Image (spheres, rainbow, N blue to C red):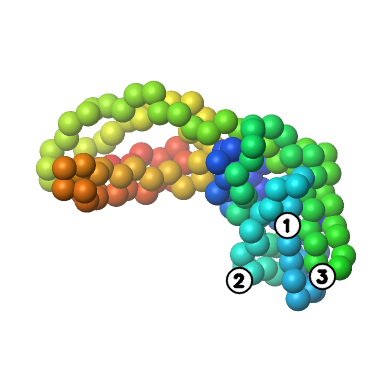
């Protein structure tokens, strides 16, 4: 193994890690571990030089000392704190709290650790009717409009 991206993700898990190296597709079974926590390998995205896995929930924020790949009976280890679990994001403020029914309004969210989320989504939910009114997906640092 040569590297992993991204280097951080929320404690609740769900981060898609890209692991790079050589000969990553030579076995019939592949397992990935962040210390003793499983990382679910996406078997449809394994190539000779790259594979992806999705992190599981960590008991607490903190560094991962080793990422291990078990390919059949061989184990490869990437050491030296290659990944850190951070505290989950918290939302402290949303502005504005009202919008037009037709949409198109920019909504600003303030909080902590928001940069650890790979695929931010904002959902407007009608509690009374129990239905999603609108959903907006954004990339990091880009505005989302509802």
- Reading the image, the residue beneath label 3 is 72
User: In the image, what residue occupies the spot 72% across and 34% down?
Assistant: 63
Relative vertical location of residue 78 with respect to residue 21 in this rendering, above or below = above
Residue at x-position 43% and y-position 26%:
111
Res. 31 image quadrant: bottom right
Numbered circle sitting on residue 119: none
Q: Nearer the viewer, mark 3 or mark 2?
A: 3
Q: Toward the viewer: 86 or 115?
A: 86
The one nearer the camera, 89 or 59, is: 59
| Mark 1 surroundings: few (<14), some (14-19) or many (≥20) residues within 10 A | many
The x and y percentages for residue 44 are 60, 71
Disc 2 residue crowd, few under 14, some 14–19, many 20+, Cα 10 Å: few
* Residue bearing mark 1: 32
Label 3–label 2 contact, CB within 8 A: no
Q: Residue at x 64, y 33 (%)?
A: 60
Above or below residue 52? Residue 142 is above
Residue 67 position in % (x across, y down): 77, 49
- Does 79 appear above or below 96? below
Q: What residue is disc 2 on? A: 44
x and y, in percent, of residue 84 in the image = 68, 37
């Amino acid at each position: 193994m040569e590297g992993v991206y991204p280097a951080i993700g929320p404690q609740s898990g769900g981060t898609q890690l890209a692991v790079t190296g050589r000969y990553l597709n030579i076995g019939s079974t592949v397992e990935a571990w962040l210390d003793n926590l499983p990382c679910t390998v996406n078997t449809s995205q394994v190539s000779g030089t790259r594979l992806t896995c999705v992190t599981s929930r960590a008991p607490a924020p903190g560094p991962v000392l080793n990422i291990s790949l078990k390919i059949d009976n061989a184990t490869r280890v990437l050491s030296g704190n290659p990944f850190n679990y951070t505290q989950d994001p918290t939302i402290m403020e949303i502005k504005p709290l009202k919008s037009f029914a037709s949409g198109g309004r920019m909504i600003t969210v303030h909080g902590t650790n928001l940069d650890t989320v790979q695929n931010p989504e904002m959902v407007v939910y009608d509690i009374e009717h129990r239905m999603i009114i609108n959903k907006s997906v954004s990339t990091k640092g880009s505005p989302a409009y509802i």
